[in-house]
Image (cartoon, grey):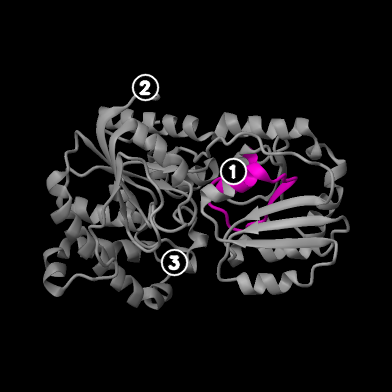
Amino acid sequence: MSGVAHKKELWLFTTRFPHGFREAFLENELPVLCDRFEKVVIFPEHADGELRPIPANAEVRHPIADPFKGAGPAMMLRNARVVVKLLRSLMKGAPSWEQLREQWPYLRARVSQFVHRAEVIRRELMPRYDPERVIVYAYWTHDWATVLGVVRERERRLRYFSRAHGFDIYEQQNRNGWIPFRSFQLEHVERVYCASRTGMEHLRSRHPDIAERFTLARLGTTDHGPGPHDPSGPLKLVSCSFLIPRKRVLLLIEALKRVTVPVRWVHFGSGEEEQRVKEAAQDLPPNVKVTFMGMFQNADIMKWYRAHPVDAFVHLAELEGGVAVAAQEAASFGIPLIVADSGGVRDLVDARTGVLLPQDPAPDEVASLLNNFQAGPMATATFRAGVRQTWSEGFEARRVFHAFVDQVLLAHEQGTFAME
């Protein structure tokens, strides 16, 4: 079935994509989706940021003019039954009454917003929904998965599946360590495709009664060919992440303070910790030079990799979700990986591709690796070829996304997404 186009339409519900910079990994998936479906309609929850280029048979629609608008009293009354179910889901999932009370004003507003969005979807989209021809896909098991569940309460013919990546899998990545509305989401979504084996196993252990509903479907990245290799000169490092606490870029700076060899470090990304990170980097020793590139479109980062030799990619995130896409992209160029064990990164990072550090590595441990890198096997062309081969076998975009669409289409044709 792989590679065969179908006369079906895909409705893809995203957070922002194709607006702005986020959900960059969809840039790799969307071309395959457009190859396999006659039409792909994208529904971003938020419409802030410039539009990125998309294939000709994809289009963007914005049925929700204001995602923060809540339902009025009459609309809430019409949806009283589902409102009660949403509230029961909150009470069932909350770790304690104290934490539920703490978040209650926010969660109450969310219920109202979900009901309003669901009413818009029912009015604007459901008249043209044909379950035989239209496949509905929520890119996160998050807000859209909840809204579609609210729609399904009154439109039982609606069927949809979702992906799950990180914060929509792991409770500890959410405020107070719980995912609001989780039981409601899982009551209605027919299949959750998990971006990593670790994430899939976590969901299966948390929800054993519906364990068969969680399936592995990794993300993948596009093949741009091997990157240039120049083992001479300073150690050339790259990192790519938002500058936020859980990405632990400050930990990398602490490690680099202990490195004695010449280093050229380039970082892609910005965020709330940007000023703090840049101030900390001012204390790096003279042998370490750093360039903060800021936010780049994904396509521009790939162009940079094609033109600049990189010795190693370093990623020390404390709370990763799936198999960090930035690490996949580096591996696709044959760049060895030095990555902390978090989320699903161990699906990619092992002795064939680099070094899997402990989840909480010490700065001295990272510094020792970097000091000895150029004299070790990871600096060789042979090792880099092996990195690229491992990536190609498990994470090349067209391979993994065609296999994903094969699963989706087969499940749709069989009348259920609940299959292995």
Relative to 262, is 204 above or below? above
Q: Quadrant of residue 365?
A: bottom right
Question: Which of the two discs, 3 and 1, labels the residue nearer the N terminus?
Answer: 3
* Label 1: which secondary element: helix
At 75% from the left edge and 39% from the top edge, which residue is drawn?
229
Question: Which of the two discs, 2 and 1, labels the residue nearer the N terminus?
Answer: 2
At 81% from the left edge and 42% from the top edge, which residue is drawn?
231
Relative to 111, is 205 above or below? above
Q: Nearer the viewer, residue 378 or 360?
A: 378
The circle drawn on residue 95 is: 3
Q: Which is closer to the viewer, label 3 or label 1?
A: 1
- Which part of the image, by quadrant, shows the C terminus? top left
- Residue density around tag 2, few if under 14, some if 14–19, many if 20 or more, within 10 Å: few
- Residue density around tag 1, few if under 14, some if 14–19, many if 20 or more, within 10 Å: many
Assess whether mark 1 and mark 2 are in contact (beta carbons under 8 angstroms): no
At 30% from the left edge and 33% from the top edge, which residue is drawn?
37
Q: Amino acid at mark 3?
A: Pro
User: Disc 2 marks which residue?
Assistant: 1
The percent position of residue 125, horizontal first and vertical second, equals: 18, 50
Label 3 and label 1: CA atoms lie apart by 37 Å
- Which part of the image, by quadrant, shows the N terminus? top left
Q: Amino acid at mark 1?
A: Glu
The circle drawn on residue 329 is: 1
Label 3 and label 2: CA atoms lie apart by 45 Å
The percent position of residue 78, horizontal first and vertical second, equals: 11, 65
Magenta segment range?
A: 303-331
**Outermost residue, top direction?**
1
Relative to 216, is 182 above or below? below
Q: Is residue 210 magenta?
A: no
